[in-house]
Structures are given as structure tokens and as C-alpha cells.
Image (spheres, helix red, strand yellow):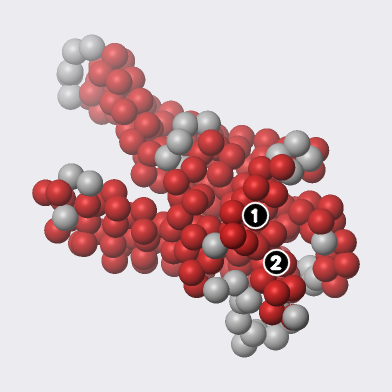
Amino acid sequence: MSAVITSLLKAFGQLGDPAVLRILAKSMAITLAIFAIGGSATLYALYHALIAWGVGFSAELSSIAALIFTLTAGWFLFRIVAIAVLQFFADEVVLAVERKHYPVEAQQARALPFREDLSNSLRGIVRTLLVNLVALPVALILLFTAIGPAVVFFLANAILLGRELTDMAWLRHQFEPETGSPVSPAQRFALGAAVAGLMVIPFLNLLAPILGAAAGTHLLHTCRKANAK
């Protein structure tokens, strides 16, 4: 798993790159805006519902409920929303890494048509929802263990993240549809687990999607070179 660790360290080292910082600012702003809009909509709906029901302290109660809802949604849905947003900037992240570290490969890569880019993003969202839906019954069975559900969703998200973060770069270099990614399932899982872990740490969870995409690009090219030998 040394290739995964090396890739993550290289990704951290590129956080000061102006191109990466611009992408980070854009994706972070959009992700936070989505949760802010959701929280505002919840506040508006709850306030008017409480007013209609004649409940006292409607403004205070709706504010508290909306805050709790937004924080809870952020905790459970941040990964899904952040990765969905990042999908629209995936090419920029991959290009920023490749232009600095893999200039030859950057010139050889293909530009994804918008239709293919959108299709990949939608498939990723559907795949995320399906895997989490499959994991949900298992998590409910393990609810009595307290930590069981967290472990189940962590493992599910590690699998999903590992694929999404390496595919962002691989799709630009996959000229034949049937060609499999050079990154092994074990390596994808290790990368996904590392990024999933970062996503539960305050502040680092905001950086995790960009770090993961950059690390996935490094990991892909490391594996491609190793397989070419």
C-alpha cells in the first residue's frame, strides 16, 4: 500500500498550487451553498408550518430544528454532495496534477465530452445511492452494537470513494471502453478508506474531496508505470 501513502503525501504537497486552490475554493463554496440553501428552505417551511399550527415561539423552534437538520444532513450527506460537486471539476483537478507531475501523460489524455462527463457523474451518484441503500439494512441489524452502523457505512463509502477518485483520472486515459483500470481493488479501497477517514475530521473534511482526487491521479499514474515495466 506504499503507492497509496505516497499518492496521498503528494496530494497534500500540492495543496499550495494556485490551480488546486482555485478548484478547492469553487467546490467548497458550492458544496456549502447547497447545505445552506437546504437549511434555509427547511427553516422557511418549518416556520410557516408552525405558524399555521398556532405553535408558540415558532421562529425560535424552527431555527433550532433547521440548524439540527442542516448539521445532521451535513454529517450524513457531505460525502455524497461533495463528490457530486467535485465531479464537475474533476478534469480541472486531474489536469492540475498531470501538468505539474505528468506532463507527457497530460498531453496524451483525451478530453471527455460533456455528455460522457455528465453520464459518469450521474452513474456515480446512482451507484452511491444504491450501495448505501444495500448497506442500510445491514447497518440496522447492527444498530444494537452502536459502532456497527458507522463501520458498515465507512466500508461502503471507502469502496465507493476508491472507485470514484481513481476513475476521475482513468476515464481521461481509457481509450478502449473494455480496458480495466490499472489500480487494483485493494489499492482503490485503501485510498477510499483514507479519504473517508479524512471526511469525518473537521476542516479536513472540506479538503478531503480535492485531496482524494489528486491522490487518485497520482495513484493511477504510479500503477500505469508499474504495469508498463
Seen at 87% across and 61% down, the residue is 103
- In this rendered view, identify the residue nearer to me: 3 or 64: 3
Q: Say whether residue 101 is visible.
A: yes
Q: Which residue is mark 2?
A: 222
- In this rendered view, identify the residue nearer to me: 7 or 207: 7
The answer to whether mark 1 and mark 2 are in CB contact below 8 A is: yes
Q: Is residue 26 left or right of residue 150?
A: right
| Label ID, residue 130 | none
> Which quadrant of the rendered structure holds the C terminus?
bottom right
- Residue 120 screen position, x and y as percent: 59, 68
Kind of residue at disc 1: Thr
Which image quadrant is residue 39 in? top left
198 over 188 or under it: above or below:
above
Q: Which residue is mark 1?
A: 6
SS category of the residue bearing label 2:
helix
217 over 170 or under it: above or below:
above
